[in-house]
Image (tube, grey):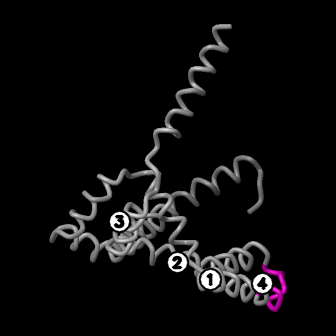
Amino acid sequence: MKKFNIILTFSMLLLSFNILAEPLSAAKKEMINELMVFTGNAKRAEERALNGAYEFANIIRQSSPDFPPTLLEIVVEEMNNKIHSELDSGNPIRDIVTEIYHENFSSAEIKELLRFYQTPVGKKITSLASSMREETASEINLWWQSLMPEIMEKSEARFKAEGMKQ
């Protein structure tokens, strides 16, 4: 019985969070859209969606080198057609990102973020974010490359110790 009461209390608590959740008003949606423009997140999300077909193709090429290239081209073309059709008939990507912002930030927090991104520091982080992400990825790749000789050496020693051929 005690277990049932704990489960019931926990369930009611979860339901109360949904009931008390702030609805997505038109005003909040507009603030979120403005924030996405400031941060570039809407554009990046759309680019990510558009690049998805090419990323998919690269994964298939690497994992299944015998996959017929013509078939892969057709699949990629159909993926791109569908993505463009979806984007042209509305903006599902912006809707997805808007919902994520809505779930994670209150209207007051969105207002604060908008004020921040309009300051000199906010504008600076926005203008540098893309190049900083690229630089970070590049530096992490270099770091990984520096680790590979030791990783390979230790892996080869283990292969040999376990009688495995390379």
Residue 96, given in percent of the width and then of the height, sits at 54, 65
Residue that label 3 marks = 31
Q: CA distance from mark 4 to mark 1?
A: 21 Å
Q: Earlier in the sequence, mark 3 or mark 4?
A: 3
| Residue type at numbered disc 3 | Met
Position of 67 relative to 161 (above/below):
below
Residues shaded magenta = 65-72
Residue 12, given in percent of the width and then of the height, sits at 57, 26
For disc 1, the neighbor class at 10 Å (few under 14, some 14 to 19, many from 20) is few
Q: Earlier in the sequence, mark 2 or mark 3?
A: 3
Determine the residue located farthest toward the top in the rendered image.
1
| Element class at badge 2 | helix
In this orientation, which residue lies closer to the viewer: 95 or 120? 95
The quadrant where residue 138 appears: bottom left
Determine the residue located farthest toward the bottom in the rendered image.
70
| Element class at badge 3 | helix
Residue 89: which numbered mark, if any?
1
Specify the quadrant that holds the C terminus.
Answer: bottom right
Residue 46: which numbered mark, if any?
2
- Magenta residue check for 68: yes
| Residue type at numbered disc 2 | Glu
Q: CA distance from mark 2 to mark 3?
A: 19 Å
Left/right of residue 10 with respect to residue 112 in the rendered view: right
Specify the quadrant that holds the N terminus.
Answer: top right
Q: Earlier in the sequence, mark 1 or mark 3?
A: 3
Residue 45: which numbered mark, if any?
none
Position of 4 relative to 82 (above/below):
above
| Element class at badge 4 | helix
Q: CA distance from mark 4 to mark 2?
A: 19 Å
Residue that label 4 marks = 75
Closer to viewer: mark 4 or mark 2: 2
Residue 102, given in percent of the width and then of the height, sits at 45, 56
